Amino acid sequence: MCGIIAITRNPEAAYEQPLAGILIDCLERLEYRGYDSAGIALLVGGMENDGADDAAIWRIRAAVSKQSLKELRKHAPSAPGPPRSDSAGIGHTRWATHGRPSEQNAHPHLDCTGNIAVVHNGIVENWRELAEELSRSGHELASETDSELIAHLIEDELRMDTSTQLHGIEATRRALQRITGSFAIAVLDTRLDGGLVVARRLSPLVVGMGGGMCMAASDLPALLGLSGNYYVLEDGEIAELTPESITAQDLDGHARTLHPIHVSWDIEAAQKSGYDDFMGKELHEQPAAVMDTLLGRFVSDGKLALDETRITDDELREVDKVFIVGCGSSFHSGLVVKHALEHWTRIPTEIDISSEFRYRDPILSSSSLVIGVSQSGETMDTLQAIHLARQLNAKVLAVSNVVDSSITRQSDGVLYTRAGPEIGVAATKTFSTQIVALQMLALYIAQLRGILYNDETSLIMDQLRDLPRLMRHALDRDEAVKSVAEDIAGQRDLFYIGRNTGYPVALEGALKMKEIAYLRAEAYPAGELKHGPIALIEPGTVVLAIATKGRLQKKMHANISEVKSRGAKVIAVANDGDTSTAALADHVLYVPETVSLLAPVVDVIPLQLLAYHVARFRGCDVDRPRNLAKTVTVE
Ligand code: F6R
């Protein structure tokens, strides 16, 4: 998830503010989309009165986490350039997915000639194939990113079509047809005489017009205050921007009409995309985050594309025991995936809270695989756990949301979640993306060991790819969850029960309720209730039961009956149309059905929403809960 901005303005007008400053201001308002590096590119020179065209691209980039924009400001022009020179520019603030955060990997990226600059948000799924193809035809790639390929693809189209002088938008449109995956892009091209090309597929992009300028950005906050008229570029559309006009077409070249959008947000609301807080926004970003995490991971030859790996396939084949270590929600995602890992790979899998792992004298060897799961990649307990694992010769693989974080540098292999920055302290989209990343890893190991055939892996990948759709349906029930939240907001104690993969869902639901709503919420494996905790159930006690379909659903029904008969008020998470669970429960939070091993990312959604609404009914600050920090760098 990155932020992009593009502006073109009248080259004849005299301006007080240099375009570089405006672009950086806009990027500042997009920093919540990423902040590990940033850059801008401006058109300089241009057609002179004598007809000579000396247009060129001036570019500046910086990679200083959270300080990159300050760096850019230091070096950007502080006064407007001469007419023509200061009329078009693009900018980018990055959240690394392909290639570590560095100046070399920061956008904008240039083609070989330096006449085309591109900023990109999204994932080029077929980047390996394209990179090989472009290298073979003589392109020199200067970065490790998938994004840079887009500049070279445009250049390639121009090179291939020397006869007909491709119209500006046409080369980009053809280049984008060669890409699979997602993109929102802005292209600055010296041939466009101050115009810009923007396009999107699956990644967001809005365009605006007004005050002698046209502009585009990955999100509205960047444009607020610059333009009075906003339009959404629809999925699969490309547009050419001049200072006075926006002309759109689809990626097949058919003309399209832009539809205006009405915006009543102020800048703060816009940064939260209209949500009152970041947690609400991030909760709803989960389907997109899961989709991004899945995109392009299983490449054409059936291999899983790990982001960095110093572990060979042979070593993965030889693994005889897996250990997953993590804290809080990251521990819970490991608990969810232990089931799939053992089921698909038949490798015994242990799961440990990081701070316990390091002091329990674990038995590890060179055939052990230790997976460190950490959203931030900086959690001290998890870092210490993987240090120990490396000392004991185990292979270490990190699953993290932050490129080049400490855990990724200290591991043998890395699989990134692509959730974008998570600003709310409570983990939401990083939890669901950790699960799907770990599930892909499990599938890959199963395939390597010959336990699953490629076609079985493909079938499960299809089911994984369907999760964002199901998650969206679960999120659509927000209002129904809110009314249940209102009903229980005055409670003090809550119990969460589940079995199998439903148990970590219960743990995660209870953790959300504890940390943001400050309610005592305890989670138990439902079968364990009768061994003690059931003594706490009394008339009116609220019990959340994860009772979605699966081989243990009947047992969950029996557990629901046990607590009901002691007077509990039961709120069940159940699948759409499940009348048997509805008959037992006081309230049902409905979710769409999927296969049990994959269901947790869908089933957890109503519990996240419930904690969120209860916290808000109780007047709690959901983004900054008391006593908690987003990154825990102490033991
Ligand atoms: C819960 C939460 C924490 C983190 C834990 C680990 O909502 O945010 O429990 O999951 O502190 O953090 P990472 O994943 O950064 O290692």
Image (spheres, helix red, strand yellow):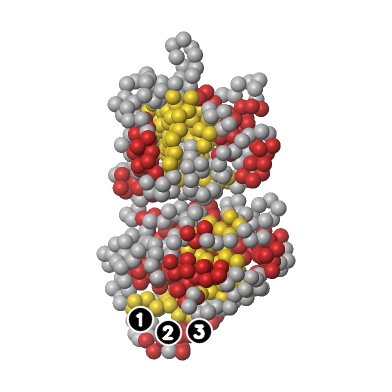
Location of residue 534 with respect to 471 vertically, above or below:
below
* Residue 89 seen: yes
The residue pinned by badge 2 equals 563
Amino acid at pointer 3:
Gly
Q: Is mark 2 within 8 Å of ligand 1?
A: no
At a point 51% along the width and 43% down the height, the residue shown is: 105
The residue pinned by badge 1 equals 541
Q: Are marks 1 and 3 in contact (CB under 8 Å)?
A: no
* Residue 600 seen: no
The residue pinned by badge 3 equals 527
Q: CA gap, disc 3 to disc 2?
A: 12 Å
State left or right for residue 348 relative to residue 424.
right
* Towards the viewer: 15 or 489: 15
Amino acid at pointer 1:
Thr
Location of residue 411 with respect to 180 vertically, above or below:
below
Q: CA gap, disc 2 to disc 1?
A: 9 Å
Q: CA gap, disc 1 to disc 3?
A: 18 Å
Q: Are marks 2 and 1 in contact (CB under 8 Å)?
A: yes
Residue at disc 1, secondary structure: loop
Q: Nearer the viewer, mark 3 or mark 2?
A: 3
Specify which label sits upstream in the sequence, 3 or 2.
3
Residue 510 image offset from top left, x and y in percent:
40, 73
Amino acid at pointer 2:
Val
How would you rate the neighbour count of disc 3 (Cα within 10 Å): few for under 14, some for 14-19, many for 20 or more?
some
For residue 132, which quarter of the picture? top right
